[in-house]
Amino acid sequence: MTTTVSWDGDDAGEEEAPDPEQIARLINRLDGRTRTLVMLHRAGSVLAVGGSQTGMVVYIEDSGGRFWQLRSADVSDELVQMVAGGQPGEYAARFVTSRADAIRAATEFAATGERAPLGWEQT
C-alpha cells in the first residue's frame, strides 16, 4: 500500500511513501502562515493536519466517506482562531490538538491506514 503526502507552503510538493521522520518534519514546519496543511493519502482515505505549533486540527476521511476529527483533552466548544489549508477559521477547542498527537495520528495512518488509538469523533 503506497502512502503519499502533500503539503502547502514555500516548497509545496508531494512525496511517495514518506517515513515517520519526513512526516514529523513536515508537521513540525506548519506555521499557520505559509505552511498550513499536510495531507496523507492512503488506499482511498485521507488524513489532513492543519494549523501551527500553537494548535493543530487533524481529520481523516475514510474510503467509506466517513469523517473523523481528532479530539484534544479539552472538552470545550469555545472557538479557537486558526489557519488550516490556507484558510482562517474557527475550530472548537475540543478539536485543537497538540503537535505530538498530530504526528502520532499521521504516522500511524501512513503505516497502517488506520486511526491511531487516540480520541476521535465522527462528525
Image: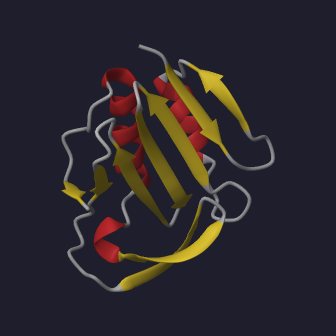
Residue drawn at point x = 54 percent, y = 22 percent = 18
Counting the numbered discs, the total is 0
- Who is closer to the viewer here, 69 or 44? 44
Q: Looking at the image, which is closer to me, 4 or 30?
A: 4
Query: In front here: 79 or 2?
Result: 2
Q: Residue at x 21, y 58 (%)?
A: 121
Considering every residue shown, the one lying at the far front of the view is: 64
Q: Is residue 102 above or below residue 90?
A: above
Residue at the image point whose x is 39% and y is 84% from the top: 79
Snapshot colouring: secondary structure
The residue positioned farthest toward the top in the image shown: 1
With 71 as the anchor, is 6 left or right in this view?
right
Residue 8 location, x and y as percent? 69, 48
Q: Position of residue 80 (x, y in %)?
A: 44, 80
Residue 119 point in image, percent of width and height: 19, 53
The quarter holding residue 74 reads bottom left
* Left or right, residue 21 beside residue 60: right
Quarter of the image that includes the C terminus: bottom left
> Which residue is most to the bottom?
78
Residue 53: x %, y % from top left: 53, 60
Instruction: Residue lying at the far right in this picture: please name it.
Output: 10
* Residue under the image location 64 percent in, 59 percent down: 31
In this picture, is 60 found above or below 77? above
Q: Is residue 122 above or below residue 28?
A: below
Query: Quick one: quadrant of the N terminus?
Result: top left
